């Protein structure tokens, strides 16, 4: 609508008749190997779809300036309606894709283009403040730096350099920064972060300048807009994905608040034992092997997507809507299981309490975990040193396979630190399945006006290894509200 031209590659089926359209709007280069597009466009074209893969604004071949999230609402609307109006189009459009390509779907859906009929967002968020740029009110340093430096700036450097007056040696500097990420993470103050200045990524500094969930973020939020979105969505996530919470909130929020009955009833959920981005091999998440059956190829994810769009864009009664709406991979048993709802109606919430004799430090301390409420017990104390913070080992990480390796890893080395409190149950007498939302209620005092507290749920195997299942963080000033911070009384 503003005259900016966005370029796309188009794959069309043989024959002259119009086809339904599958649109992918990506900041990651429309010419990437087809296998990285989530759905092979050649396979989709053979199925009778016109596939449009577009570089988003300011990325690779497309005109304009890229500013994360900002233009995807209007550009998404315009791109959907353009695709619907082409002579080779049947006028029905679906969207699909991973990660930021999920952003482009949900933002377009917020704009309510009349010809958008269904979406299939995979591993993406419901909010770009909480759960993307910030977690529990804490700036997601590893993700924001690795993603912005590598995937957004360095990968698109040729396009950036053609639009802006950027010295050619900046590319070498970016390469050096990505190769030494561990030292880059330690740079302070964050608002003076040197590697993205000079117009390379102005949005990065705006994120830092808006730590509260204020107006800058709120108009971008998906979950705040569920009530105006009217498209069915196949929500695909991973147990070790950085955006798992957002995937679940989009599914639940659209079920409860979607703008139409069709949208509310047209939500489906698929969760595998996956991390964000590439793993080291089929069936692997971190260094844990969940079996070949856990791989997206094993469940024919392409086939599922095509069945999804066959129903919503072609009107094919293929039975997909009569199947259970939820499919999850049960880690440990390493099997797929269909469910009628999320959270599972048959699940029982069980409170576990932290216990100790005042020395829960390290895995050899006296911290225990049990369903019995604590009596008169001394507090546990640890000394936090920001010069030597507890390192992250695996979990829901992105976006550097070496410095930010995600997934399941042994936590024993970290549990030997004095600034880590460990609370463990006795060996379990029987198998216990933990499936559903988890909450930690932490009673804590700190000598500072603000402190980040983290918690991690760990599965101890019979041989002693300690495998991370999930984790969380809260910055104390945001304990009551992400939008209205209040420091604690030291």
Image (cartoon, grey):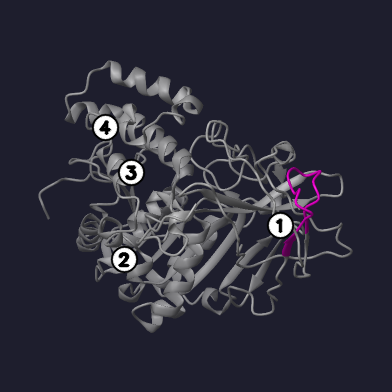
Along the polypeptide, which appears first: circle 3 or circle 2? 2
State how far apart marks 1 and 4 are (Cα): 41 Å
Kindly state the secondary structure of the residue where label 3 is placed: helix
Q: What stretch is highlighted in magenta?
A: 353-368
Along the polypeptide, which appears first: circle 2 or circle 1? 2
State how far apart marks 3 and 2 are (Cα): 27 Å
Residue drawn where x is 46% and y is 29% of the image: 186
State how far apart marks 2 and 1 are (Cα): 33 Å
State how far apart marks 4 and 3 are (Cα): 15 Å
Name the disc covering residue 76, or none: none
Badge 3: how crowded within 10 Å, few (<14), some, or many (20+)?
A: some
Task: Looking at the picture, tell me which residue is in the foreground, 197 or 391.
Answer: 391
Q: In this view, does 362 lie to the left or right of 147?
A: right
Residue 185 position (above or below residue 28) = above
Q: In which quarter of the image is residue 350?
A: bottom right
Q: Is residue 407 left or right of residue 357?
A: left
Numbered disc in front, either 3 or 1:
3
State how far apart marks 2 and 4 are (Cα): 29 Å
Q: Where is residue 212 in the image (x, y as percent from the top left)?
A: 34, 55
**Residue labelled with disc 1:** 331
State how far apart marks 3 and 1 are (Cα): 36 Å
**Residue labelled with disc 2:** 109
Q: Position of residue 480 (x, y in %)?
A: 45, 64
Along the polypeptide, which appears first: circle 1 or circle 4? 4
**Residue 201 is at least partly visible in this image:** yes
Q: Where is residue 202 in the image (x, y as percent from the top left)?
A: 25, 38
Name the disc covering residue 208, or none: 3
Task: Looking at the picture, tell me which residue is in the foreground, 110 or 473.
Answer: 473
Q: Are marks 2 and 4 in contact (CB under 8 Å)?
A: no
Task: Looking at the picture, tell me which residue is in the foreground, 337 or 316.
Answer: 337
Numbered disc in front, either 2 or 1:
1
Name the disc covering residue 200, or none: 4
């Amino acid at each position: 609508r503003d005259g900016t031209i966005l370029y796309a590659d188009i794959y069309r089926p043989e024959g002259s008749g119009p086809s339904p359209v599958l649109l992918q709007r990506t900041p990651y280069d429309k010419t990437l190997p087809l296998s990285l597009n989530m759905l092979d466009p050649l396979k989709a074209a053979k199925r009778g779809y016109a596939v449009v893969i577009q570089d988003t604004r300011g990325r690779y071949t497309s005109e304009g300036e890229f500013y994360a999230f900002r233009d995807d609402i209007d550009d998404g609307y315009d791109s959907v309606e353009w695709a619907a109006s082409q002579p080779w189009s049947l006028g029905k459009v679906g969207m699909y894709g991973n990660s930021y390509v999920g952003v482009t779907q949900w933002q377009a859906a917020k704009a309510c283009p009349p010809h958008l009929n269904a979406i299939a967002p995979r591993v993406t968020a419901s909010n770009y403040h909480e759960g993307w740029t910030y977690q529990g009110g804490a700036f997601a340093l590893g993700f924001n730096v690795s993603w912005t430096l590598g995937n957004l700036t360095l990968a698109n450097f040729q396009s950036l350099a053609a639009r802006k007056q950027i010295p050619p040696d900046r590319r070498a500097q970016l390469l050096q920064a990505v190769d030494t990420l561990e030292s880059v993470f330690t740079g302070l103050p964050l608002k003076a972060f040197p590697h993205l200045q000079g117009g390379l990524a102005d949005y990065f500094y705006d994120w830092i300048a808006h730590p509260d969930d204020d107006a800058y973020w709120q108009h971008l939020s998906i979950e705040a807009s569920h009530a105006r979105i009217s498209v069915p969505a196949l929500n695909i996530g991973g147990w070790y994905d950085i955006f798992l919470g957002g995937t679940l909130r989009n599914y639940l929020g659209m079920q409860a608040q979607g703008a139409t009955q069709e949208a509310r009833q047209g939500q489906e959920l698929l969760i595998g034992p996956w991390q964000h981005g590439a793993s080291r091999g089929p069936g692997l998440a971190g260094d844990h092997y969940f079996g070949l059956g856990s791989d997206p190829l094993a469940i024919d994810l392409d086939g599922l997507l095509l069945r999804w769009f066959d129903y919503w864009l072609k009107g094919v009664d293929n039975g997909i809507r009569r199947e259970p709406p939820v499919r999850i991979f049960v880690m440990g048993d390493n099997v797929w299981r269909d469910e009628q709802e999320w959270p599972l109606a048959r699940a029982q919430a069980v409170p576990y309490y932290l216990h100790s004799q005042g020395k829960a430090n390290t895995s050899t301390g006296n911290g225990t975990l049990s369903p019995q409420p604590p009596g008169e017990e001394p507090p546990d104390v640890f000394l936090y040193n920001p010069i030597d913070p507890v390192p992250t080992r695996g979990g829901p990480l992105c976006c550097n396979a070496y410095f930010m390796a995600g997934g399941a890893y042994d936590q024993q080395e970290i549990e030997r630190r004095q600034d880590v409190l460990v609370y463990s149950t006795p060996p379990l007498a029987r198998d216990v399945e933990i499936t559903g939302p988890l909450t930690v209620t932490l009673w804590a005092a700190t000598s500072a006006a603000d402190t980040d507290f983290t918690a991690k749920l760990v599965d101890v195997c019979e041989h002693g290894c300690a495998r991370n299942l999930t984790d969380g963080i809260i910055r104390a000033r945001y304990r009551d509200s992400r939008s209205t911070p209040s420091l604690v009384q030291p």
